[in-house]
Image (tube, grey):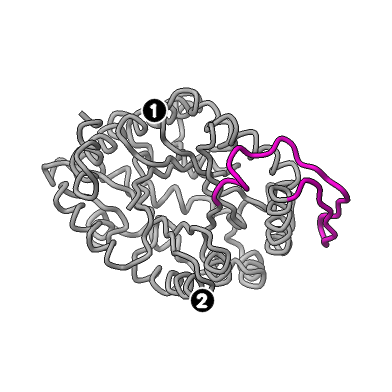
Amino acid sequence: MRFGIYCEMQTPAGKSYYDMTWEIMRQIEHADECGFDVYSVIDHHFFQKFSISANPLAMFAAAAQRTKRIRFRTALHTLPLENPMRLAGMIAEADILTNGRLECGLGRGHAWLFGPSSVPLEESRPRYNEAIDILELAFTEEKFSYDGDYYKVKDVSVVPRPLQKPYPKFYTGGTSDITYRMAGAKGWGIFVPPLLPWKVLEGPLSIYKNACAEHGNQPDIVYIRPVYIDDNEKQIKKEVEQAICNFLAFNASPIESLQDQAKKAELAAKGYGFYASGALESLTKLTYEQIVDQEIGFIGTPDKVIRQIETLQKKGGIGELAIVSNFGGLEHWKSIKIQHMFAKHVMPAFRNETVAQAAD
């Protein structure tokens, strides 16, 4: 099993954007030193509490100059809001600047992004599908043409070309069954939403694993969970209770922009029913104890977290546990503490002891 870190760059009111950005940069450097395999950053705009990560490729290009081995992954590029011909060249340049350490998540995007981006919601799925076609052509053909409903180009050559051949590994994620089937058929890795308990995810992941088997592909599930570790359970609650509750609240905060009944009906009609279901809002009502008991967060002593990961492994198809070490306004030192303790006390249970030595 790989171990990664997933970051949304949640930024509470009053927090400096400068401070937030450079704290994340220092946390990436520390994750590299500790032996984490990959650092994933979301691609998101407009909603500060949810994320200020407006340019993950720039973050990765800078971080690559300050790290040695850790890989970088966008989670996820919002394809319907991008020009795929231009994005292909941007991905390729970032792959060069990271010395081939780039991976790419490709997503349809959160429903609340489309209004501020001035793109009709109903165009999300067809734009997404066409963008995927174009990216695959751009990376595998010296010159290509495309005649779609939204993109029509003739004899286009994308430069530069990525360092990795034919292109960086692709991942996707989301809440719709069609996404899980597509990922399995293409042999892509898949992210699961970091807020939902296993019982909710089990059905969609079965669709993904069945599609992988049908097409001869190996499942690669990236399972995301916020983590907090200490030897003292009471100290854990004292240090993390507010931040873990904020994590859920900040994730749900953009839903306020989609609350009127007409908008909810539109969401249901245009393939974004999850956002009209009330699921996100319901998570904000959970107590700290419920968050821990439902394993929405892996929170506890190192031995407890090791047992939780061992149980997760038995589910099958889990290629990576991506921990969230910065969430809900958590102080920088606590994020460093999470990464340090996870690398020192948890990762060696699933790897050799060199990881623990790197964390010392």
Q: Does the magenta portion include 152?
A: yes
> 81 or 291, which is in the foreground?
81
Label 1 environment density (alpha carbons within 10 Å; few <14, some 14–19, many ≥20): some
User: Which corner quadrant of the image does residue 265 belong to?
Assistant: bottom right
Task: Kindly indicate whether the residue at mark 2 contacts the one at mark 1 (C-beta within 8 angstroms).
Answer: no
Q: Quadrant of the C terminus?
A: top left
User: Which corner quadrant of the image does residue 283 belong to?
Assistant: bottom left
> 172 or 42, which is in the foreground?
172
The magenta span reads: 141-169
Residue at the disc numbered 2:
214
User: Relative to residue 194, is residue 354 depicted above or below?
Assistant: above
Q: Position of residue 150 (x, y in %)?
A: 81, 57
Is disc 1 placed on a helix, strand or loop?
helix
Q: Which disc, if any, is residue 353?
A: none
User: Relative to residue 148, is residue 251 depicted above or below?
Assistant: above
Of the two numbered discs 1 and 2 on the same chain, state the one appearing first in sequence: 1
> 135 or 150, which is in the foreground?
135
For image coordinates 44% across by 71% down, the residue present is 209
Q: Left or right? Give the position of 310 relative to 71.
A: left
> Label 1 is placed on what type of residue?
Glu
Is disc 2 placed on a helix, strand or loop?
helix
Q: Position of residue 277 (x, y in %)?
A: 51, 69
Residue at the disc numbered 1:
29
Q: Left or right? Give the position of 360 relative to 3.
A: left
Visible in this render: residue 237? no
> Label 2 is placed on what type of residue?
Glu
